[in-house]
Image: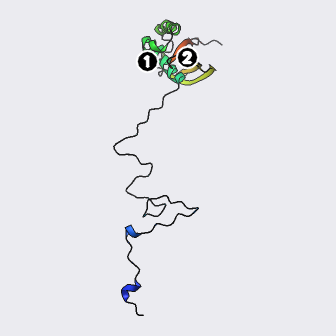
Amino acid sequence: MLTTHTDALPPARTRSTRVPPAAGPGRPRTGPPGRPPGRRDSRRPAGPRTSPTRAVRRRPARPDPHDWFAEQLLLTLSGRRPVHALLGHALPAAYDRLVELAPQAPLRPTGTGAGRYAPAPSVAHCGLCLPRPDVIEAFARIASGERLRALAFRLELGGDARWRCAAVDIGPSTRVW
């Protein structure tokens, strides 16, 4: 039996006739057929597949209620926001207290002399206590330059699932040793 030169060559392989390696018990098949496992198509970005016409929209992370209220109270009590901005976010007693405190602007930045001003106040830290699931008692340390002030407030969860400020108190404005 004589073989010709063409019989000795292996058959030509094309992409469509390529047999993928078998997925054994310890080696699951992870890629598309026709491509060895572990290789990725360089034309396609890595990561989960999403439809090009439908973008995935994620909600921005919502701050915790005590952090949000501390920032809002700081803006109001420093004179950067009017009191009525908190009208729907405060119960009547707390709103009356804010109306009493706001004209004094107890958290406003104070001048440091020689024409320089202190930096705008900011919430340095905010902590909380949960006496009940529907009540948050919070405190905030307000920093303005080297000065540190205390702010305490109480939040209550209403029947409409909204947190409202029920009480506000601010530490003394002068240092007592």
Residue 132 seen in the current view: yes
Q: Look at 62% across and 21% down and name the residue there.
A: 130
Dot 1 crowding, Cα within 10 Å, few <14, some 14–19, many 20+: few
Mark number displayed over residue 48: none
Pointer 2: what residue? 155
> Nearer the viewer's eye, disc 1 or disc 2?
2
Image quarter where the C terminus lies is top right
Q: CA distance from mark 1 to mark 2?
A: 39 Å
Q: Check disc 2 and give the amino acid type.
A: Leu
Q: Check disc 1 and give the amino acid type.
A: Gly
Residue 155, given in percent of the width and then of the height, sits at 55, 17
Q: Look at 42% across and 69% down and name the residue there.
A: 18
Q: Residue furthest front?
A: 1
Residue 105, given in percent of the width and then of the height, sits at 48, 11
* Mark with earlier residue (1, 2): 1
Mark number displayed over residue 115: 1
Front position in the image: 124 or 84: 84
Q: Look at 52% across and 10% down and name the residue there.
A: 94
Is residue 32 placed above or below 104 in the rendered structure?
Answer: below
SS assignment at label 2: strand
SS assignment at label 1: loop
Q: Tell me the quarter of the picture where residue 168 sits.
A: top right
Front position in the image: 114 or 7: 7
Front position in the image: 76 or 153: 153
Residue 11, given in percent of the width and then of the height, sits at 39, 78
Image quarter where the N terminus lies is bottom left
Dot 2 crowding, Cα within 10 Å, few <14, some 14–19, many 20+: many
